[in-house]
Amino acid sequence: MQVLYLHGFASSPQSSKATFLARKFAERGVRTIVPDLNEPDFSTLTVTRMLRQVQNVTASTDGQLVVVGSSLGGFVAVQAALQHPDRISRLVLLAPALDFDGNRLSQLGDRGLGAWKSSNSLPVFHFGYGRMMPVHYELYADALRYNALDAGLTQPVQVFQGRFDTAVDPITVERWAAARPNVELHMLDDDHQLLKSLEGIWVEMERFLLVERES
């Protein structure tokens, strides 16, 4: 088994969650692949481009992949699982942006959707780079092609969602999980980052991905 970790919007492979989980998996002898979804340029980010990066991983590896997706990475993970059901065996979603759309993105900047379209530039704070950076309108236009809320996944899915999340709606995540018998939901007293809950998340993730498969 190999793990593919997809980081969130305006984040990076060096994020706290990516680093923590890669270390934990390494201790169990499991390889973690963490592509930089900002490449080649954050401003031209789209869901389609991120899915091509997932395709590159599936093409260059053998065997089953477990995909762990954080926030927007969770949205992309759902799309990837739909596209590669023969390669992606399980999903773990961390505060997944299941209702990701351009309207939510437009709230990240100081201008509306119309201004974003006319200027083709929405300034957002990039936590990985530590500064404001622009993202093009194509991120919104491209995202309209994808839908996670109605996705009919067949793989086992584990979800961790903070009750105090202000970036992802906890109620939406709860409803999405409740409608799917293959989804195991853990609601946590935490915010969007889930940093206070990482040790507990690992305990459940290890059981879901490693212990159950070994037994």
Image (cartoon, rainbow, N blue to C red):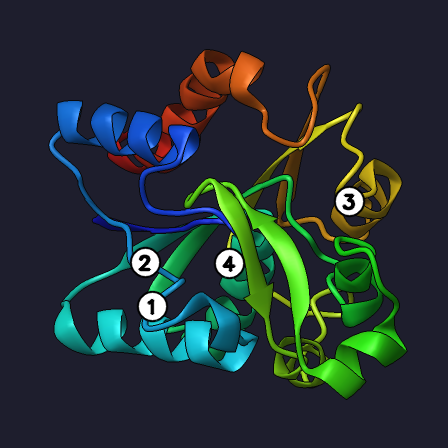
Q: Earlier in the sequence, mark 4 or mark 1?
A: 1
Asked whether, in this view, residue 188 is left or right of residue 159, the answer is right
Q: Secondary structure at mark 2?
A: loop
Residue at 64%, 48% in the rendered image: 96
Name the residue carrying label 4. 155
Q: Of discs 3 and 4, which sits in the foreground?
A: 3
Asked whether, in this view, residue 94 is left or right of residue 186, the answer is left
Measured along the vertical axis of the image, is residue 133 above or below residue 53? above
Q: Earlier in the sequence, mark 1 or mark 3?
A: 1
Name the residue carrying label 3. 173
Where residue 171 appears, as percent x and y from the top left, is 88, 40
Q: Earlier in the sequence, mark 4 or mark 2?
A: 2
Measured along the vertical axis of the image, is residue 159 above or below residue 63? above
Name the residue carrying label 1. 39
Whether residue 159 is visible, yes or no, is: yes
Label 2 vs label 1: CA separation? 6 Å
Label 1 vs label 3: CA separation? 28 Å
Amino acid residing under circle 1: Glu
